[in-house]
């Protein structure tokens, strides 16, 4: 019995350390409900063949949904080893290696220029630090969907009030798209 309790204690401590560490790196892991994932991708109007980047991909649910239900190619960036391995197992179990790529690393050090759509569920201060990178690296017409937290420097294109989802479009020359919507 003591081996079971010791193992359980170790796993709980590992989970807590992982959560605290990822929180300091951009956001704690909080899984997005599956319906919210579908709504995020629908809000962005993801089309077959487009490339969806999930910054802080956690357990890979955005990647799997983008590839399976929307016909997109997906790239997940995850800094936490345990979440990265979880995503790796999920992609492998679903047989999606031809459509999904995983990168273990810091999202601030990754090139995002290949994205048609970027999905985030990060903390507000992380979004604040990320927005210049998005404007610099994303092509005109690229879309950014954020769960719960906003981007003040990007042009708000649509909002899903029920799920607190925000859609932004990148305009020409790395500028926000025409600011017709107000807010965030």
Image (cartoon, rainbow, N blue to C red):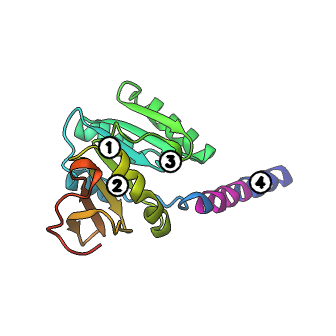
The residue segment tinted magenta is 13-23
**Eyeballing the image, is 173 above or below 145?**
above
> Could you tell which of marks 4 and 1 lies nearer the N-terminus?
4
- Residue that numbered label 3 is attached to: 107
Give me the disc on residue 162: none
Task: Please identify the residue farthest to the left as the structure is shown.
Answer: 180
Mark found first going from the N terminus, 3 or 2: 2
Tell us which disc is closer to us: 4 or 1.
1
Seen at 38% across and 29% down, the residue is: 96
Q: Nearer the viewer, residue 173 or 119?
A: 173
Residue at 27% across, 36% down: 72
Residue 131 location, x and y as percent? 39, 59
Residue at image mark 4: 10
Mark 4 or mark 3: name the one nearer the start of the chain: 4
Q: Count residues near mark 2 (Cα–Cα under 10 Å), then give few for <14, some for 14-19, many for 20+.
A: few
Q: Earlier in the sequence, mark 2 or mark 1?
A: 2
Mark 1 highlights which residue? Answer: 65
Residue 106 x/y as whole percent: 55, 46
Assess whether mark 3 and mark 4 are in contact (beta carbons under 8 angstroms).
no
Nearer to the camera, 129 or 118: 129
Decide: marks 2, 1 in contact (CB < 8 A)?
A: yes
x and y percentages locating residue 12 in the rendered image: 70, 58
Does the magenta segment cover residue 139?
Answer: no
Q: Earlier in the sequence, mark 4 or mark 2?
A: 4
Badge nearest the viewer, 4 or 3 = 3
């Amino acid at each position: 019995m003591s081996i079971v309790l010791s193992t359980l204690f170790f796993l709980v401590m590992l989970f807590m350390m992982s959560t605290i560490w990822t929180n300091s790196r951009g956001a704690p892991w909080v899984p997005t409900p599956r319906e919210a994932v579908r709504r995020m991708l629908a809000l962005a109007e993801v089309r077959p063949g487009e490339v969806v980047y999930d910054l802080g991909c956690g357990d890979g649910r955005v990647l799997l949904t983008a590839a399976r239900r929307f016909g997109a190619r997906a790239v997940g960036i995850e800094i936490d080893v345990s979440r990265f391995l979880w995503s790796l197992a999920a992609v492998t179990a679903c047989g999606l290696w031809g459509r999904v790529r995983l990168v273990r690393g810091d999202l601030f050090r990754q090139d995002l220029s290949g994205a048609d759509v970027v999905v985030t569920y990060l903390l507000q201060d992380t979004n604040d630090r990320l927005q210049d990178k998005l404007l610099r690296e994303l092509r005109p017409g690229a879309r950014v969907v954020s769960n719960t937290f906003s981007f003040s420097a990007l042009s708000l294109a649509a909002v899903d009030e029920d799920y607190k989802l925000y859609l932004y479009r990148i305009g020409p020359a790395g500028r926000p798209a025409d600011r017709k919507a107000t807010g965030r």
